[in-house]
Image: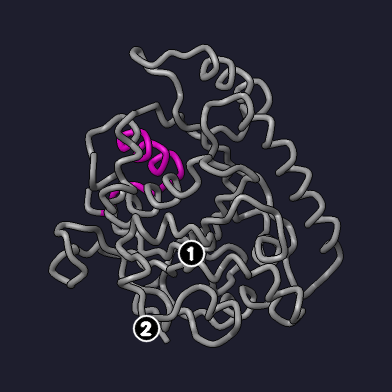
Amino acid sequence: MKTSSITVDPRFRPKRRNWPLIWAYIIECGGSTKSTSATSMAVTAALRGYPSVVYDLDSNMSSTTVLGYDETSLKGKKTAIDLLYGQATLDEVALPARYRIGDGYDDEDFAPIPNLRIVPSSPTMAGADTAIAEDADRNDWFAEILRSYEGDDTVFYLDFPASYGKMPYSVLRMMDEDDSVIPSIKADPKDVKLVKRLRDELERVRDKNRGRRSVPGRPTLNHLLLTGTPTPTYNEAAARRATAAAEAKYGSVLLPYVRYSADAKKLYEDEVPLPILLPNSVPAVDYRKVMTHLGFVDQAA
């Protein structure tokens, strides 16, 4: 097990607990930019010197792919489903994050991303809710990881599927007010409307766990990330309406905007996270502003 060799900043260990901050990227909407935001923010922080782990809990494997692994390269390796079944530890599953620089699957076809690990997903994660339903003890899989943790990571970034099932619940119940539920949504009126349903779901989790001592049970929407916002060359009416609606309803939790870029989707095609693939693009610049806003300043500066 990874043992901390440094003194971790107390702000990453609220209430003197032994595990890092938990940031949950969740919204009941496919293609909402959860994976783009989770990986972009994690890579930005890692490049600034903050060690962290990205958990890809979605069977579509978007974060896994962006951070250097696909089904071919994962053959014979443990994945998130092994954590859920209690068949491996975090350190046995988490792989060094990397990005593609070649065309093959050998180590020389990838370059490492310092300070970042990825808990890779697999198509079998589609059965995570069923696994928990068949064995109620599996509801504690994430709690077991947290309580046995001994590392020096600053944040656990969790990329969820577009659902509010048993697997997401098993993570949300372990969050408190110092952690952050971060819906990452496009500047689209339909996406903005879905934030209310997420807040209702968080309230349901809090109600279910109110008074329990075994879990914090207080997941809180501390931040909202709006992506694809208007620019001088992208000024669609729907994006303007969505931005105005988000400001009116959720202004107190809105993070700095991530502006629209037609090139942003290339990160999936090239298997390279946005801050490395297009470091000077407007969304990459904006994700750096987001992380600075959240206190992740460049430690080398």
Please tell me whether residue 61 is drawn above or below residue 203 in the rendered image. Answer: below
Task: Name the residue that disc number 1 marks.
Answer: 55
State yes or no: discs 1 and 2 in contact (Cβ < 8 Å). Answer: no
- Residue type pointed to by label 2: Gly
Please tell me whether residue 286 is drawn above or below residue 49 in the rendered image. Answer: above
Q: Residue at x 56, y 26 (%)?
A: 188
Task: Report the magenta stretch's main SS.
Answer: helix
Q: Nearer the viewer, mark 1 or mark 2?
A: 2
| Frontmost residue, 235 versus 250 | 235
Image side of residue 209 versus residue 191, left or right: right
Q: Position of residue 206 (x, y in %)?
A: 80, 56
Q: Residue at x 58, y 41 (%)?
A: 223
Secondary-structure class at tag 2: loop
Image side of residue 202 versus residue 72, left or right: right
What segment carries the magenta color?
284-299
Task: Name the residue that disc number 2 marks.
Answer: 76
Report the Cα–Cα distance between label 1 and label 2: 19 Å
